Amino acid sequence: MATYKIAVIGGDGTGPEVTVEAIKVMDAAADKFGFKVDKTEFDFGGERYKRTGETLPDSGVEELRKFDAILLGAIGHPDVKPGILEKGILLSARFELDQYINLRPVRLYPGVETPLKDKGPEEIDYVVVRENTGDLYTGAGGFTLKGTPHETAIQTAMYTRFQVDRCLKYAFEYARKYGKKARGKGKENTLGLVGKTNVLTFVYDLWERAFHEMGQNEYPEIRRDYYHVDATCMWMIKNPEWFDVLVTGNMFGDIITDLGAITQGGMGIAAGGNINPEGVSMFEPIGGSAPKYTGQGVINPLAAICAMQMMLQTLGEETAAEKIEEAVKTVTATKLKSLAAGRMGYSTSQVGDLVADLVAQ
């Protein structure tokens, strides 16, 4: 029987509440499908920072390296200046643990409203693979003459071939295993590169050359498409059914994944994974800490449950992950009035119970 060591970081605001429900469903899946989960909780977040001044200390990073995966609730505290916790915990973990893939499914579940006219679950069903360690996020750059009328700010987008290749390899492998053809929903598995080769003629020239070289030599059965990022944003609204798996750099990925989230019903259902395929990955709901709802039992836990589902899939518990996803679809289609906090028709705990009960059947 497989045993997985999972680090649990409830974090701030409603993060601990939704994490409890994700763990409830995970435990039901473990009982049903015959694996064990050894959970260890960590208190990284705003309250710890207020007490100690620490965000994610070096000792904490070393502790997290010992786990198979990390389940995160939310980071963001109303009493802490924005950016301190996000950079000190989230970005620090991503860089220190080399979580070089950000994986964001964009899937509209049955019963969930989308702002896109005449689009439903069949049309909104694709995945974005975002490179998670390079680009403008590396901090290369600075100021000259800061505070004067002539000050100049420079922030440089940087990529190495190594970073690009390993991200592309993950994306091709993901398309091969989970693309629409692999799931019986299309005639071919397709990987689309999202870039801006007509303007960013260095960075995305590197991406495009690497993309086609790898595809031709190692993944000839996977169809390759290229989309400019601005056109991608239009097509995500007009024709989301065109997409299967998309791969892109850090900055563009940051933007298009949030656009994708609103088309799938908003942050109450969007989940993501920060993945190191050779190391420790971290999975989280995207919606944030929502501090105004803390302790009320009204927040939607489905995004956290979906993040946990992604975690089990990444760990290799495919059957359990499929069962959880089907349970979530059943709940959205037949039970919930809305995904919005306080308007679901059920409490946070009751929604967790609904999903857990279906998984256990």
Image: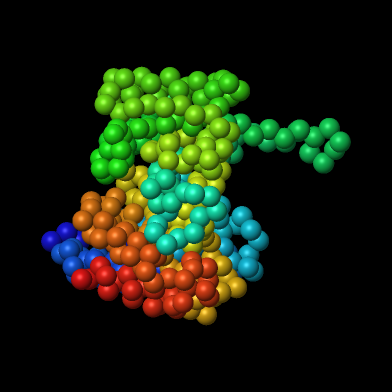
Q: How is the image coloured?
A: rainbow
Is residue 46 among the parts visible in the rendering?
Answer: no
Coordinates of residue 96 in the picture (x, y in percent): 44, 47
Coordinates of residue 358 in the picture (x, y in percent): 27, 70
Q: Quadrant of the N terminus?
A: bottom left
Coordinates of residue 115 in the picture (x, y in percent): 55, 53
Residue visible at 31% across and 59% down? 325
Q: Quadrant of residue 144?
A: top right
Residue visible at 26% across and 44% down? 183
Q: Quadrant of the C terminus?
A: bottom left
Residue visible at 37% across and 69% down? 334
Is residue 76 among the parts visible in the rendering?
Answer: yes
* Residue at the far right in the pictured view: 149
Above or below, 284 relative to 208 = below
Q: Quadrant of residue 67?
A: bottom left
Q: Quadrant of residue 71?
A: bottom left
Along the viewing direction, whichever of 185 and 126 lies nearer the viewer: 185
Coordinates of residue 30 in the picture (x, y in percent): 22, 66
Along the viewing direction, whichever of 109 and 177 lies nearer the viewer: 109
